[in-house]
Amino acid sequence: MAGVTRIYAKKRFSHHTSPSKETLIRDSSGLTPAEKRLNENEDIKLSVRTYDDKSSALEHESSDTYSADSDGYHDDHKNFIRVQSRRSKKKNRGLVNLSVDSRIINKPWIVLGDFNQTLHPEEHSRPPTLNIDTKMRLFRETLLEADLADLTYKGPKFTWTNKSKTHLVAKKLDRVLVNDDWLSLNPDSIAIFGEPDFSDHAVCEMSFRFYNFPLHNEQFMDHLTDLWYSANVSGSAMFTIAKNLKLLKPGIRTFSRENYSNLERCVEDAYNTLLAVQQDILTAPSEAKAIMERLAMEKWLTLSKAEERFLLQRAHINSIQGVRLASWGLNIQTACCFCSNQDESRDHLFLNCTYTTALWNRNFERLDPRRMAFLTWEELLFWLRVSAASAPSTLKKISTQSLLYNVWRQHNSAVHLNGFLPLQTTFNTIDREIRNTISARRHRRKFTTLMQLWIR
């Protein structure tokens, strides 16, 4: 390291400035003691350079390292270990740096793929320990600093297996991460993990809720095809697809406005027109009026089916899988798995259920004693953005993330396993996760006072 090289340079300097009488005496090897020391020093120099090159490579990978030149820090072995421990942290800085990029900041952002790291010990089928290790802590810190969290997902608990015949291991390595702006823009988007097929990773599909009744219009796909091929875009395949999708938006809006604007009123007008034509046929029948009746009937059926699909989809936006499957005629329990008082909608499960409300109230006791339970997600998001001296926005986000995650864990445990944990046990888990998160980042400026605010 630099410190070792500096020590070696001092030895060389003292040797040449103060030669001793030993330089005049030679032994059987033909070398004087001074020449022997010079050769030994050359060997030291070579080994130091090799060691220094390795350490420089490590330091180059890390943006937060301590060198041997630091005041009061000259232990090269400790320095090497310190640099080694920073290597994984450098890899996580990419997400943080990208999150504050001017092209992304304050915009909806989604990151998905294989992160090759678990976030919780239970995301490992055979965890070596139930404690949070260094890599897991760094991954948590990265997501927190980048303001990213798991998107609501469905599917298996694990997304990867080593396919070993003797020691099978499964982990959750694949994730879909989003920021608050994404959730505000796409509150009903979900990730669906499926079977791996030929791979060792589960396939992931993104599901976005949109009103799909225009897809049943026979003219819509032709209109969409004309818009797609009329776009004159050149560039890479990815750029062409992204640009074409942007160019489709105005055309789709125009089609929807011309055909489905004020849908309920259009259905009513089409129905009245059909009745008028039928009345006219019964008064004075003719082939021309029969054609008018057929056209009026087609228009009314098209609009009425679109309205039906619109209302059906709108009714399911706030529902969870059990309610949706029950609407298809399956014999599935739709009541909330915690309180059994209402159907298990998204808003009820995370905001209004007595089990969840009690957890929120315990959160409020520490962060915002005057706060009442949230009625809508907009209230929750607004509360998260407002920072106060007694409840900084960072602490609110940490506690909310942990609370929502543990509510969903208990929901899955109640549905798929043998029930859910008592309220106090769940809150103890939330409290422990929040303390661990704050403790792991206590050296950062935003986190220096959070522990005092949380445990007061």
Image (cartoon, rainbow, N blue to C red):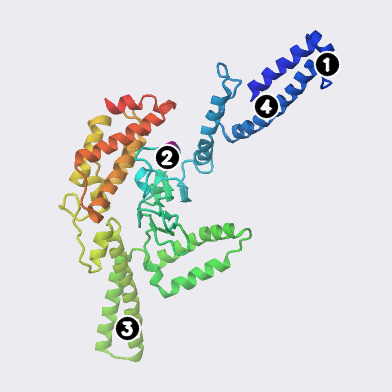
The secondary structure making up most of the magenta span is: helix
- Residue 256, compared with residue 377, is above or below; it is below
Numbered mark located on residue 26 in the image: 1
Q: Is residue 112 left or right of residue 51?
A: left
Q: Quadrant of residue 421?
A: top left
Instruction: Look at the numbered disc 2 and give the secondary structure of its residue.
Output: helix
Give the residue at mark 3.
293
Q: Amino acid at mark 2?
A: Met
Instruction: Look at the numbered disc 3 and give the secondary structure of its residue.
Output: helix
Q: Amino acid at mark 1?
A: Arg
Q: Amino acid at mark 3?
A: Glu
**Residue lying at 36% horizontally and 36% vertically, measured from the top left:** 385
* Picture quarter with the C terminus: top left
* Picture quarter with the N terminus: top right
Q: In terms of sequence position, does the residue under pointer 3 or pointer 4 come before the other?
A: 4
Q: Nearer the viewer, mark 1 or mark 3?
A: 1
Q: Is residue 379 visible?
A: no
Q: In terms of sequence position, does the residue under pointer 4 or pointer 2 come before the other?
A: 4
Q: Position of residue 67 (x, y in %)?
A: 59, 24
Give the residue at mark 4.
48
Q: In terms of sequence position, does the residue under pointer 4 or pointer 1 come before the other?
A: 1
The magenta span reads: 133-137
Query: Extreme left residue here?
Result: 341
Give the residue at mark 2.
136
Of the pair 47 and 54, the residue shown nearer to us: 47
Q: Position of residue 175 (x, y in %)?
A: 42, 50
Q: Distance from label 4 to label 1 (Cα)?
A: 28 Å
Asked if the magenta segment contains residue 11, the reply would be: no
Q: In terms of sequence position, does the residue under pointer 1 or pointer 2 come before the other?
A: 1
Of the pair 426 and 165, the residue shown nearer to us: 165
Q: Distance from label 1 to label 3 (Cα)?
A: 122 Å
